[in-house]
Amino acid sequence: MRSTRDVAKPRGVNASVRPQMIAEYKFRYDEAYVVEALKHYRRQHHSRRWLWFLKLVGYLGLGALVAVGIYAKSIPLTTIFVFFIALLAVGPHLDYWWVRRQLRKSPSFHSEVLVRFTEDHYYGQDANGHGELLWRAFVKGFRFRDGILLFTSPQQFHWLPDSGISVGSASAASSLLLTKVTKYYGAEQNAPEDALKQRASER
């Protein structure tokens, strides 16, 4: 049930008239959704390229140490460095495993989620409750090829996949956000990397 705050009260119009819904999303809050949300969060993060660079340096350094261990015919030393290379390779997958494990403890796990965009509000609902936010509560957003990532703080974000759109369209949702969220990087950008370049140029 929508709260009374959802009800629009335009001048000269009956107060029972509701604001126009621009877009509606329906999706399941499950492991696949959370992993995709985390992947998109990492893709927009400004330190992503540095992390890839450091990871490459780590591979090269450990690879050189493995070669030294083999040359020295030291099986224990070689095994240790190979282990660290493997750990570096599977690191992100360990994160996803941990996220899945924690998600199963959430009361919202596997629940259906409903999100609606109107001119004035972001409305969200799941099996445990509902709530709405004014658009000014969102500090930034990114348009990806397959969805939208919205932030209420640097660590609090909402992933809205295009596959979950049940009313409206991705372009309509993005057009609304361009007018409502000050730092929304979308519509004219084709990839989050373009948005990162634009954000860097604004500093």
Image: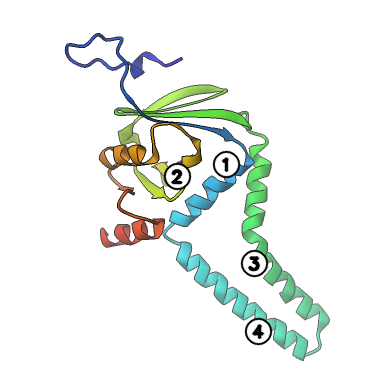
Q: Amino acid at mark 2?
A: Gly
Q: Looking at the image, is mark 3 or mark 2 earlier in the sequence?
A: 3
Label 2 secondary element: strand
Amino acid at the residue labelled 3: Leu
Q: Secondary structure at mark 4?
A: helix
Against 140, is 137 above or below? above
Where does label 2 land, which residue?
147
Category of crowding for the residue at label 1, using alpha-carbon neighbours closer than 10 angstroms: few (below 14), some (14–19), many (at least 20): some
Question: In this image, 177 relative to 96: left or right?
Answer: left
Q: What residue is disc 1 on?
A: 33
Q: Position of residue 182 (x, y in %)?
A: 27, 43
Measured in 3D between alpha carbons, the distance from the residue under mark 2 to the one under mark 1, in whole angstroms, is 12 Å
Q: Which quarter of the figure has residue 121? A: top left
| Disc marking residue 64 | 4
As drawn, the label of residue 88 is: 3
Q: Gap in Å between the C-alphas at discs 2 and 4? A: 41 Å
Q: Residue 82 or 26: which is nearer the viewer?
A: 26
Mark 1 vs 3, N-terminal side = 1
Of all residues, the one furthest to the left in this rendering is: 12
